[in-house]
Image (cartoon, rainbow, N blue to C red):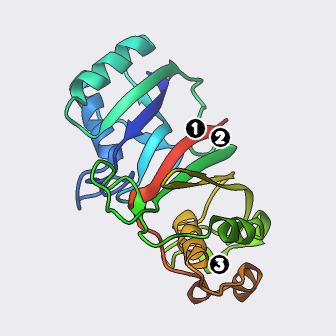
Amino acid sequence: MTRFILTLEYDGTDLIGWQENRQGPSVQAIIKDAIFGFCKQRPDVVGAGRTDAGVHAVAMTAHCDIPGDHSAQTVMRALNFYLVNQPVSVLDCKVAHDDFNARFDCVARHYKYVVLNRGASPVLQKNRVYWVPRKLDVDAMRHAARCLIGNHDFTSFRASECQAKSPIKTLDKIEITQNGDEIIFEFSARSFLHHMVRNIVGTLIEIGLGKPYDMDAVLAAKNRSAAGPTAPASGLYFIRADY
């Protein structure tokens, strides 16, 4: 039995998210099925993050144990053979130490959120951006975002179904850049609460539209109703995990 580190790219549009269950296709189930096609076993596949339905990944790190004595290149080629026509692809594969854990060994996770800020609705980028047709005030969003950097109680940006033991997280980075019609939000932290990024983006967009949210007051309220709406999953991407 050999442990491998997989780097995965996926389009989450038609997936129920990372976690396998009986309600629909998941990233985890698709990878397990590909491993079964290769070696007739379905070992657990552990990811650095458990993305929600509709969320994409540029480079999600995962680990799994595969029986036999196979090279990383053989495993990668075999899995991609069985992943043809699936919304998941293996970008890289490496042999790992037996105790490596893609989830618990991760020291930082990086996400980006993409907003298309133009009057015309997306066609080529449909299901891959959040379309906001009204003009956004990027400077106002940047100013508000600065209040969230650092160690805070993020209860106001936490989904009701979040299972994290504590709402206190340290947000290392929020950067907002604009490239033509695209506004890109970049987030970095060791870990995030459920829907935390999407709830922050939803609130920042409200501020960009001129709504009078005071981020310090939103944090202090420790109440989800104090913040703005949850931004759609379509604009969110898991970028990478650091170890």
Instruction: For marks 3 and 2, give the one nearer the viewer.
Output: 3
Task: Please determine whether, in this image, residue 134 is positioned above or below residue 71.
Answer: below
Quadrant of res 156: bottom right
Disc 1 residue type? Asn
Whether tag 1 and tag 2 are in contact, CB under 8 A, the answer is yes
Instruction: For marks 1 and 3, give the one nearer the viewer.
Output: 3
| Number of other residues with Cα within 10 Å of mark 2, as a class: few under 14, some 14 to 19, many 20 or more | few
Q: CA distance from mark 3 to mark 2?
A: 25 Å
Disc 2 residue type? Asp
Q: Residue at x 61, y 70 (%)?
A: 137
Whether tag 3 and tag 2 are in contact, CB under 8 A, the answer is no
Q: Nearer the viewer, residue 15 or 94?
A: 15
Quadrant of res 100: top right
Residue 129 percent coordinates (x, y):
40, 56
Sequence-wise first label, 3 or 2 = 2
Instruction: For the N terminus, give its image quadrant.
Output: top left
Task: Please determine whether, in this image, residue 35 is positioned above or below residue 168.
Answer: above
Residue 51 percent coordinates (x, y):
45, 54
Q: Is residue 154 left or right of residue 146?
A: left
Q: Which residue is mark 1?
A: 101
Residue 174 percent coordinates (x, y):
69, 57
Q: Which residue is mark 2?
A: 105
Q: Nearer the viewer, residue 57 or 202?
A: 202
Q: Which residue is mark 3?
A: 155
Q: CA distance from mark 1 to mark 2?
A: 5 Å
Q: Is residue 216 left or right of residue 59?
A: right
